[in-house]
Amino acid sequence: MNGGLSPSWKKTAAERDAKVGAFLQLAPDLGAAPSTTGPLAGIPFAVKDNIAVRGFQLTCGSKLLEGLVAPYSATAVERLVAAGAHPVGKTNCDEFGMGSSTENSAYRKTVNPWDASRVPGGSSGGSAAAVAAGIVPFALGSDTGGSVRQPASFCGVYGLKPTWGAVSRYGLVAYASSLDVVGVVAKTVAFARAAFVAMRGEDPLDHSSLTWRPAPAPKAGRGLRIGIPREATGAGLHPDVAAALRASVERLRSLGHEIVEVTLPTLEHVVAAYYVIATAEASANLARFDGVRYGRRAADAVNPEQLVIASRSAGFGDEVKLRILLGTYVLRSGFQDQYYLQALKVRTLIRRDFERCFANLDLLLLPAYPVPPFAPGSADADPFAQKLADVFTCSANLAGLPALAFPAAVEHGLPVGMQLVAPAFADDLLLAVAEALEKIFPSPDPPAFPAFGPWKGR
């Protein structure tokens, strides 16, 4: 037994992963046995394969990094291990975190544990599938524009995107640095909270990390004021998502909270601003992957220029190439003012829009995604449609705010999630409200994957 993981757990984990394809590397005996003390002692967790874990692979779902083994661990992972948790493997993801369905992975297909004909969401789809299938009680993911919350919604589990800077990004392979956050997918709010508390806080290895300074709690004895943006309740919502939103409103009211309608007019500009900023930063961050220093290298190049071109052409997938090209375009001389700088101005307006709302509100309630889990090849699977559907999630990334996706319903056999957004450093308030909702509607188990493991009652 290694780290408290029994042979029966290892056998069941392998059997379940064979059905969903959540892991790119499931190796519970690879890491050193963790501490036997701490709030997460003996608890296994999975890590998205764009976050470094010493001795494990680090491919980011890309052929360009095939065979790369991480020589160090991310700060978030180190802190979880210090709390007693045990990393057991690396989960599948859209290449470099670019996608909403985990279909852009260069290695394998991951399916939704609720319905193998549906996607698990993305880009942290492997982490969400691993948690929903009961293999681990929590997993790390990265959230650049909803990549933790959307798959959590699709798989019927919890997904926390912390305040930007609250969790160190050291050891996270950068996609868009001003948007990226290390987040957690969990079966219960308690596991999400325990993981977040262990990870958060300033890190000398990450200059963008911040000292944890929780926002003032609302006055005791009163319900919260929770706003629903009028722009998030329109005709674009699938009927099942609209039904889950109504159910969430009724549950929040039953808990004594006041629900008010608000306006968030900048919401219509969120997707455009997000993709300009994200692709611009991606084009700069991914320039380091050139086949020279590490990763896959083209074998038939005759000079350094051809080596870089051949390595990147063969190693990057189509979606990554598209985003690099878009980012390079908006950063070109003569185009920066027209696109990139305009997007930064819109980002400022989005932040101010949230500040205006939170002057009179405690939280905002929005859908996590406008449609339920979709099937590959459907209209909702169209890459352009997926980008437009990020409108509800990427707004929190642009504003640097914490957001939490929570299970809201099971409609026609598929889970549907909602999300709550809070002011900066009010992450604990999100968890408290989600915990109250959990008592009414906990994370449901997929029929084919009943709960198992010694942690299931924790």
Image: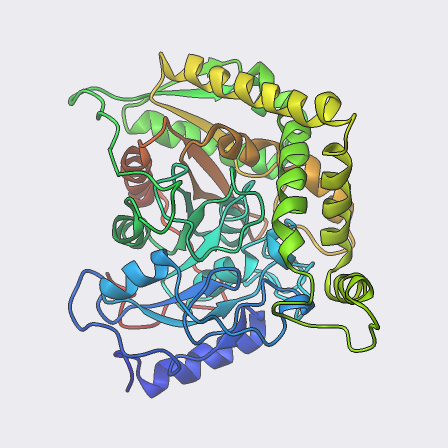
Percent of width and height locating residue 173: 52, 56
Q: Is residue 233 visible?
A: no
Q: How many marks?
A: 0
| 116, above or below 172, in the image | below
Q: Is residue 90 visible?
A: yes
Name the quarter where the C terminus is drawn. Answer: bottom left
Tell which of 195 and 262 is nearer to you. Answer: 195
State the image quarter where residue 450 is shown: bottom left
Percent of width and height locating residue 88: 40, 73
Q: Residue at x 63, y 31 (%)?
A: 237
Q: Is residue 67 left or right of residue 272?
A: left
Tell which of 118 and 357 is nearer to you. Answer: 357
Q: Residue at x 39, y 79 (%)?
A: 28
| 59, above or below 192, in the image | below
Percent of width and height locating residue 288: 63, 56
Q: Is residue 255 left or right of residue 169?
A: left
State the image quarter where residue 451 is shown: bottom left
Percent of width and height locating residue 164: 41, 37
Tell which of 215 and 454 is nearer to you. Answer: 215
Name the quarter where the N terminus is drawn. Answer: bottom left
State the image quarter where residue 139 is shown: bottom left
